[in-house]
Amino acid sequence: MSVKKFHVVVFEEEQATAIIPDLSLRGNNSVVWPPYKTSLSQNSAVQNEEVPRESWAVHPIRLLYCGKYHAFCTKITILMTSL
């Protein structure tokens, strides 16, 4: 059974922190992100590891942490308060 890998990143332009699935990461400094308008839709895409589409924009990011999704429920709160 393979372990699903996720990352905590900071979107450089927005200075927003997010969890992204490994398949959305492009190198160590950019990510392909869905254009969904609601955080519910974005969270669903992340949790379900939705395959990125050609229409999704590439955003510059700063990589903060890598690990399992459920570990981030705690970790992202800590990181957000330290930014």
Image (tube, rainbow, N blue to C red):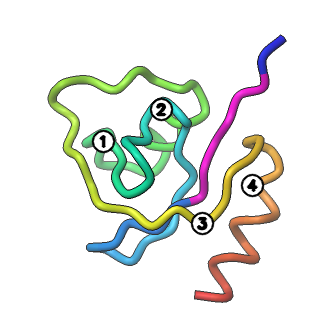
> What residue is shown at x 52% (from left), y 59% (from top)?
18
**Earlier along the polypeptide chain: callout 1 or callout 2?**
1
Which numbered disc flags the more N-terminal residue, 2 or 3?
A: 2
As measured in the structure, the alpha-carbon distance from the residue carrying label 4 to the one carrying label 1 is: 21 Å
Separation (CA) of disc 1 from disc 3: 23 Å
Which residue range is magenta in the image?
Answer: 3-8
Mark 1–mark 2 CB contact (< 8 Å):
yes
Answer whether residue 28 is magenta in the image.
no
Q: Is residue 17 left or right of residue 2?
A: left
> Disc 3 versus disc 4: distance between alpha carbons?
11 Å
| C-alpha separation, residue under disc 1 versus residue under disc 2 | 9 Å
* Residue occupying image coordinates x 26% and y 73%: 13
- Mark 4 / mark 2, whichever is N-terminal: 2
- The residue to which callout 3 is attached is 64
| Tag in front: 3 or 4 | 3
Q: CA distance from mark 4 to mark 2?
A: 16 Å
Question: Mark 3 Cα within 10 Å, few/some/many (few <14, many 20+)?
Answer: some
